[in-house]
Image: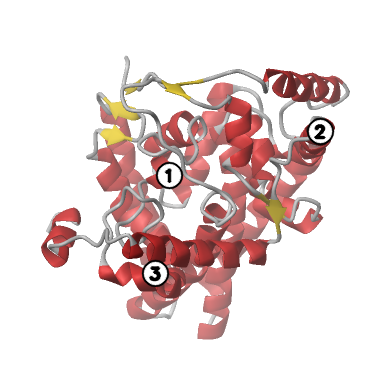
């Protein structure tokens, strides 16, 4: 059953075909010498096992601690270890490159995401068939469909408060995961247009999964701890919210600094044209930026998100191989005298993202693009 359609937008392939061919050929040589080919290696499986143990220990600790401090510590350990598991294992599985077996990877992906309260069905479609193909291209990249409270590209409606978005953004990011789990999933399931994708029909089983995931998540991480411990429901909720607030800030910046920073631009498609005036490989590189590419701790924690350029060129490859693929990309671009590759540290990325928010709002407000009937239009945007 066909459940979605894709817009017919293609890339031009001109002077950079040789660059892409060279990168691919050198990558093939590397994979030919790799025991694990394009899938997870032994270290990746050890890391996954350790993360699962930490998640299990943290949850066990939540049910057995007797002080509020230890409860907070246990929830934070659970949240950040589960998030790390999702970034490292769930993300690879979503791209079917964890085991290389599509059905097995899908089960792992759905399980890892589902246990964290997220329905993976639409996320996977949006991520793999929209964002990865057309990053930062307006009306095609679903990752540009953010809240109207944040202004990142010139096609969004501008409100007076956007002038201060670089100040309130970090606080706003603290609600990211809770909004996604309890609001955005339901909005996405009720929306037909997703960037370049048009949802024709969502299978009934996915609606069932959506409800079961939410009920299971609330029961597992709120109701069961409230029932089996000596803490009150209000204390559990407070600690649960604190966990989400802190990990959401961490997660939001991890996502946003790869594409929404001062060093990266946004792009348009020509009206009534189905050809984007750039080669695929060039666009993937210039619309993306790495952070801490040589840092082994970053490689361990961020599951390849810090080597995001390699991920966009090789989405079918486990992040365990990204350090070597990044070196191949860098050397190939240098040989062709192309200065497309960009990187910074994590905290430089955070600063660049906030600077981008400030400059983007200032530029559009200066151009006089503030929406006229602000209050009524904003309420309408939220469906009120």
Residue that carries the numbered disc 2 in the rendered image:
328
Which label's residue is closer to the chain start, 1 or 3? 1
Name the residue located 84 percent from the left edge and 35 percent from the top edge: 331
Classify 28 as above or below 157: above
Q: Quadrant of the N terminus?
A: top left
Q: Name the image quarter holding residue 279.
A: top right
Residue 105 % position (x, y): 57, 30
Mark 3 residue element: helix
Which label's residue is closer to the chain start, 3 or 2? 3
The answer for how far apart the CA atoms under marks 2 and 1 are is 27 Å
Residue that carries the numbered disc 1 in the rendered image:
143
Circles 2 and 1, Cβ within 8 Å, touching? The answer is no
Q: Quadrant of the C terminus?
A: bottom left
Name the residue located 65 percent from the left edge and 67 percent from the top edge: 347
Name the residue located 13 percent from the left edge and 56 percent from the top edge: 380
Q: Which mark is residue 165?
A: 3
Residue 83 % position (x, y): 56, 55
């Amino acid at each position: 059953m066909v459940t979605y359609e894709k817009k017919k937008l293609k890339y031009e392939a001109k002077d950079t075909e040789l660059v892409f061919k060279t990168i691919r050929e050198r990558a093939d040589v590397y994979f030919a010498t790799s025991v694990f080919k394009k899938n997870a290696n032994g270290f990746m499986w050890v890391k996954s096992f350790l993360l699962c143990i930490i998640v299990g220990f943290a949850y066990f600790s939540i049910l057995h601690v007797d002080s509020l401090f230890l409860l907070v510590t246990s929830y934070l350990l659970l949240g950040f270890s589960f998030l790390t598991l999702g970034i490292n294992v769930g993300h690879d599985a979503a791209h079917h490159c964890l085991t290389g077996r599509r059905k097995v990877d899908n089960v792992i992906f759905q399980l890892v995401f589902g246990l964290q309260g997220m329905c993976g069905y639409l996320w996977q479609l949006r991520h793999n068939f929209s964002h990865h193909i057309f990053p930062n291209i307006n009306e095609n990249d679903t990752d540009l469909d953010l809240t109207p409270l944040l202004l990142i590209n010139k096609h969004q409606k501008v409100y007076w408060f956007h002038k201060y978005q670089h100040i309130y953004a970090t606080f706003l990011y603290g609600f990211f995961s809770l909004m996604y789990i309890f609001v955005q999933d339901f909005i996405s399931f009720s929306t037909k247009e997703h960037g370049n994708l048009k949802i024709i029909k969502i299978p009934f089983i996915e609606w069932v999964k959506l409800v079961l995931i939410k009920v299971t998540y609330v029961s597992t991480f709120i109701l069961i701890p409230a029932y089996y411990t000596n803490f009150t429901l209000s204390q559990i909720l407070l600690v649960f919210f604190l966990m989400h607030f802190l990990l959401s800030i961490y997660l939001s910046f991890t996502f946003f600094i790869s594409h929404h920073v001062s060093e990266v631009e946004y792009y348009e498609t020509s009206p009534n044209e189905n050809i984007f005036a750039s080669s695929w490989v060039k666009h993937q590189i210039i619309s993306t930026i790495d952070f801490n590419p040589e840092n082994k701790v970053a490689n361990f924690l961020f599951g390849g998100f810090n080597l995001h350029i390699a991920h966009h060129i090789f989405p079918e490859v486990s992040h365990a191989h990204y350090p070597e693929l990044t070196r191949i990309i860098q050397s190939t671009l240098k040989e062709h005298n192309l200065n497309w590759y960009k990187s910074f540290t994590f905290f430089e990325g955070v600063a660049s993202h906030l600077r981008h928010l400030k400059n983007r709002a200032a530029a559009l407000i200066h151009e006089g693009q503030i929406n006229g009937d602000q209050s009524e239009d904003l309420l309408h945007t939220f469906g009120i």
